[in-house]
Structure formats: C-alpha cells, structure tokens
C-alpha cells in the first residue's frame, strides 16, 4: 500500500491533479484485470448472476476510488509511515465494528476486551508515529 501511494503520488505530480492520477490508476488496473480474465478464461458473469448481488455490493469500486484518491492526498501530507499507521488503525477499528455486528456478510465476532485492547494499541501506535 505505501508503494502504491508513492507511485500514485508521483503520477499526481506528473498529471497535476489527484483526481486524474486516481482515474488513470484505476483505468490501468481495470485493463490489467480484463486482460487477465480473458487470458485465464474466467467465465463471464451472466445477467442473472449479477442480479443476485445486493445493491450495496456494487459500491466496492466507489470505496476503492475513494481510498486511492485519499492515499494520493495523504501520502503527500503525512509521509508513508504516518499514513500507513492511521490507515491500519482506522481499518482495524472499522473491522472490529463490522465483526461485532456481522455487517455486510461477515460472521459475528463479538468485541472482547483483548480485541478492543489490541485495536487501542494500534491507535496509540498511530498517535506515537504521528507525533514522532
């Protein structure tokens, strides 16, 4: 992830805008995935298959675009280590909540004191990295 952020930050510098850098990054990734799907002969999903997905399952690309765009902005402002510390702390906090409530298809894993303590340590780590 820090390499991707750095590469996209360099692309933003070349293109002059984080939105275009994120768009180009996604376009290249999309082309590579389509090429791989064709080469690997992955079956093309049918309309019936796509209709079985809930509406919110189609928002993954939106979240991905937001993350890539945000990383381009954050990488320039925070640097790689601080950016990654906050991303990991935030991702673990979000995962703790998703697991606890069994949201979007995850199995329920209750918040326990050891799990909460582990995420708290990640947040403390992010604060330390941010300060020093």
Image (cartoon, rainbow, N blue to C red):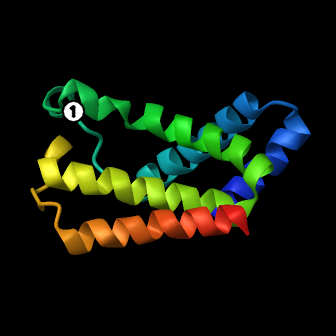
Residue 93 screen position, x and y as percent: 36, 55
For the point 38% across and 37% down, which residue is it?
Answer: 60
Q: Is residue 108 left or right of residue 89?
A: left
From what the image shows, is residue 99 above or below residue 56?
Answer: below
Q: Residue 14, position in %: x, y?
A: 90, 41
Residue located beneath label 1 in the image = 46
Image quadrant containing the N terminus: bottom right
| Residue sitting at x 49%, y 49% | 33
45 or 16: which is nearer to us? 16
- Image check: 19 left or right of 101? right
From the viewer's perspective, tell me whether residue 131 is left or right of residue 17: left
Q: Is residue 41 visible?
A: no
- Give residue 49's quadrant in the image: top left
Which quadrant holds the C terminus?
Answer: bottom right
The image quadrant that residue 73 belongs to is: top right
Residue 35: % across, % down: 52, 49
Q: Is residue 98 above or below residue 114?
A: above
Query: Up-down: is 30 above or below 128?
Result: above
Viewer-proximal residue among 3 and 29 = 3
| Residue at x 13% of width, y 47% of height | 101
Residue 69 seen in render: yes
Please provide percent x and percent y for residue 92.
38, 60
Residue 54 relative to residue 117: left or right: left
Residue at 54% across / 42% down in the picture? Answer: 67
């Amino acid at each position: 992830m820090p390499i991707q952020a750095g590469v996209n930050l360099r692309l933003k510098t070349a293109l002059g805008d984080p939105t275009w850098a994120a768009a180009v990054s996604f376009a290249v990734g999309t082309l590579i995935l389509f090429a791989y799907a064709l080469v690997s002969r992955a079956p093309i999903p049918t309309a019936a298959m796509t209709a079985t997905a809930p509406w919110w399952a189609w928002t993954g690309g939106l979240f991905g675009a937001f993350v890539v765009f945000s990383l381009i902005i954050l990488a320039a402002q925070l640097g790689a280590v601080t950016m990654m510390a906050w991303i990991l702390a935030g991702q673990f906090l979000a995962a703790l909540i998703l697991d606890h409530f069994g949201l979007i298809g995850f199995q329920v894993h209750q918040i326990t004191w050891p799990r909460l303590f582990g995420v708290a340590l990640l947040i403390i780590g992010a604060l330390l990295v941010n300060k020093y």
